[in-house]
Image: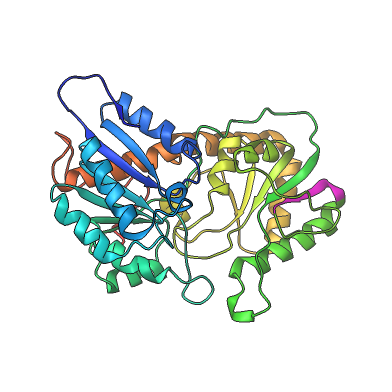
Amino acid sequence: MIHQADRGASEGARVLLVLNERATGDAVDCYRALRRLESEGIVDAWAVYPYLARSSVGVVGEAMIEEISHAVVALGATVLIFTHLHGVGVFASSVRRLRAAHPKLVLGFWEGDWYEQYRKPFPRESWGTCAECDIVFVCGDGYVGRQLKRHGCHDVRYVPLTGDDRFLKQPTQSTYEFDVTMICSLVTSRIPFKRMPGSSMRQRLAARFTSRFGSRFAVFGSGWSGPNAHGPVPYGEQAEAYGRSAVALGCNNLYAKYYFSDRLPIAMQAGRPMVHEFVEGAVEVFGIDSGVNWFRSVDEAVRLTEAVLGDPEGALRRAERAHLLAEDRFTTYHAMQYMICALSSKRSICPGVDGTTANPWITRDLL
């Protein structure tokens, strides 16, 4: 379905989002972001191609690229953004043919996962696909960026993982069900060099906080067992899960400069005092007064949590700063706005858009 603003002459970009949806409409944050950008005139028309839904019925490889090409024509797309696009038989040669058929189309690749060389290698088929795109957007700096440059990607930009307007600020309570809540999966492996580096920290945090807080500590997510384990939380209900607790606790599974899980901005949006493992580059991304309580060790995490619990009014003031920051800079809307404007500026699609579209999160280019 094509969504088009009723403004007469085209003013903004016409965006086709090739999205990893298993059912149309699942990614509600992207739809809401595109509608808002449409209302603001940045987007003139948009459509979503749900590639996982199409691959589930056998449309893969060249057949998928042919369908995407038809969608470009139907929309009159000026900007196309791929998301992930792994495992469906789309390779660099397919994207080259798509570009040849639509020479005025600007292509972006939005990779919302982070990878590591041995523990979680970047999908091989995607190196060439990314190299065919005008801009590749990644959620950290390090291994992925270096490899993209090595494979011919000349414009790689940072876009963090974000929350969205599903994650509402949770009410302040006089008492909470838990003192501390951590939401994360326990991802481990019997092969030592394949273990996620953050899994060890998560296990040590869970053990220490269980010892210190007993049943007042809760861990949500798959892979955990024991009386403190409360099972997985549906993605859209994470703010409510954080809202059951006085403090939110977090750490990442993988480490890279600027990289953090979307659970960090979700907890910030929820208005919970956040105690989170330090992220390299955090001052640049979040500023010096983010409201997040950063720790570098399990001992420091416990000390910070006890300090937050001992000063609830001060903690809530910091949580309010974090909430406002997340609402102002860390939602899907902000990510989509930046990517669409950056891609549009490549060929002056949007009148008045500066070709040097500034990154709203970091002050330097990745490449």
Between 90 and 356, which is closer to the camera in this rendering? 90
Q: Position of residue 131 (x, y in %)?
A: 26, 64
Instruction: Give the x, y percent position of residue 235.
Output: 60, 43
Q: Looking at this view, is 86 or 184 the one in front?
A: 86
The residue at 70%/43% (across/down) is 247
Q: Is residue 65 left or right of residue 113?
A: left
Quadrant occupied by the N terminus: top left
The structure's colour scheme is rainbow
Count of labels in the image? 0
Q: Is residue 275 left or right of residue 322?
A: right
Q: Is residue 287 visible?
A: no
Looking at the rendered image, the quarter that the C terminus falls into is bottom left
Give the residue at x 86% y 49%: 215
Q: Among all residues in the image, which is located at the extreme front?
A: 58
- Picture coordinates of residue 130 (x, y %)? 30, 62
Q: Nearer the viewer, residue 358 or 1?
A: 1
Does the magenta portion include 69?
no
In the image, residue 62 above or below residue 146: above
Which residues lie in the magenta part? 215-221
Residue 59 placement, left or right of 239: left
Relative depth, front residue between 151 and 261: 151
**Rendering coords of residue 248 (x, y %):** 67, 45
Compared with residue 274, is residue 367 higher up or lower down, i.e. above or below? below
Residue appearing at x 43%, y 31% in the figure: 32
Q: Residue at x 39, y 53 (%)?
A: 59
The answer to whether residue 229 of the structure is visible from this angle is yes
Vertical arrangement, residue 8 with respect to residue 115, above or below? above
Q: Image quadrant of residue 140?
A: bottom left
